[in-house]
Amino acid sequence: MIKIGAKLKESRIKKDLTLEEISQDTKIRKEFLEAIENGEYRRLPSSAYALGFVRNYAKFLGLDENHSIALFKREFDSEKSFEVLPKFSAGSEISFKKLRVGRNLILFIGILTFIIFFIFFQYREAIFNPMLQVASPKEGETISSQDLQVLGKTDPNSVVYVENNLVSLDSEGNFKKIITVFPGKSVLNIKSVNRFGKQTEVKRHINVEPVY
């Protein structure tokens, strides 16, 4: 079977032309011309390029284009010659699919993390006892008045009791309460309770001196 590559090469040699000269005139790279002459179509970018190169090469040498193309198509098996090309395309498609799946997975994890964080933030009070800080009185403090001011801070959504008396809070959870105490040693109970029933209790041991 006559091969188009051999026919092109034979015609080129008869015309005493080099591959470099034909490459310069046709703008087809020398290695592609060499691949066509040797029937190594794998070295060409694609089947479309192979067909175009053969057509231009034959036209430049003055050969019948239709006959040359017919010879090319008869010997050319696009599936075998360009087996790498479909695999590359399929691989690219798989890579793009993996990339999309990866992005969707990252997005899903991000949304899930946000939801978990939001739920935890909203219902953390169901897990942890409320914060309670008592600034006054100090532990073991001696008081020389029957009026005792209790100062402190807790979570804004909690309620505070001083000696079982409900105390109001400001928007930041600060509280202040003045209570009456009697001479002698006593234990002051301050308690904070959140909406889930979690509570924190602070005891202050104080000594109240008699007032004369």
Image (cartoon, grey):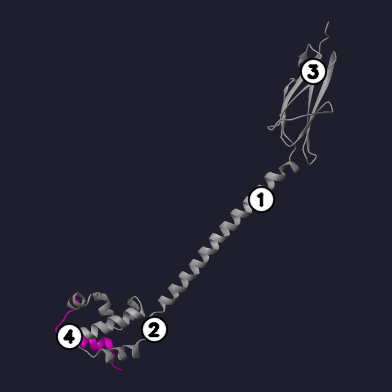
Question: Which residue in the protein does label 4 denote?
Answer: 13
**Quadrant of the rendered structure where residue 83 is?**
bottom left
Q: Which residues are magenta?
A: 1-20
Residue 69 within the segment the image draws in magenta: no
Q: Amino acid at mark 1?
A: Ile
Cα distance in 3D space between marks 1 and 4: 77 Å
- Look at the image and tell me in which quarter the N terminus lies: bottom left
Q: Disc 2, disc 1: CB below 8 Å?
A: no
Q: Is residue 206 left or right of residue 106?
A: right
Residue 202 visible, this orientation? yes
Question: Which residue in the protein does label 3 denote?
Answer: 206
Q: Amino acid at mark 2?
A: Ser
Name the residue: 36% across, 80% down: 47
Q: Amino acid at mark 4?
A: Ile
Callout in the foreground (2, 1):
1
Q: Position of residue 29 (x, y in %)?
A: 25, 74
Cα distance in 3D space between marks 2 and 4: 28 Å
In this view, 179 is above or below 49: above
Question: Which residue in the protein does label 2 denote?
Answer: 78
The secondary structure that dominates the magenta segment is helix
Q: Residue furthest top?
A: 212
In this view, 125 is above or below 162: below
Q: Is residue 96 left or right of residue 56?
A: right
Q: Disc 2, disc 3: CB below 8 Å?
A: no
- Look at the image and tell me in which quarter the C terminus lies: top right
Name which of mark 2 and mark 1 comes first in the sequence.
2
Question: Which residue in the protein does label 1 denote?
Answer: 116
Name which of mark 4 and mark 3 comes first in the sequence.
4
Name which of mark 3 and mark 1 comes first in the sequence.
1
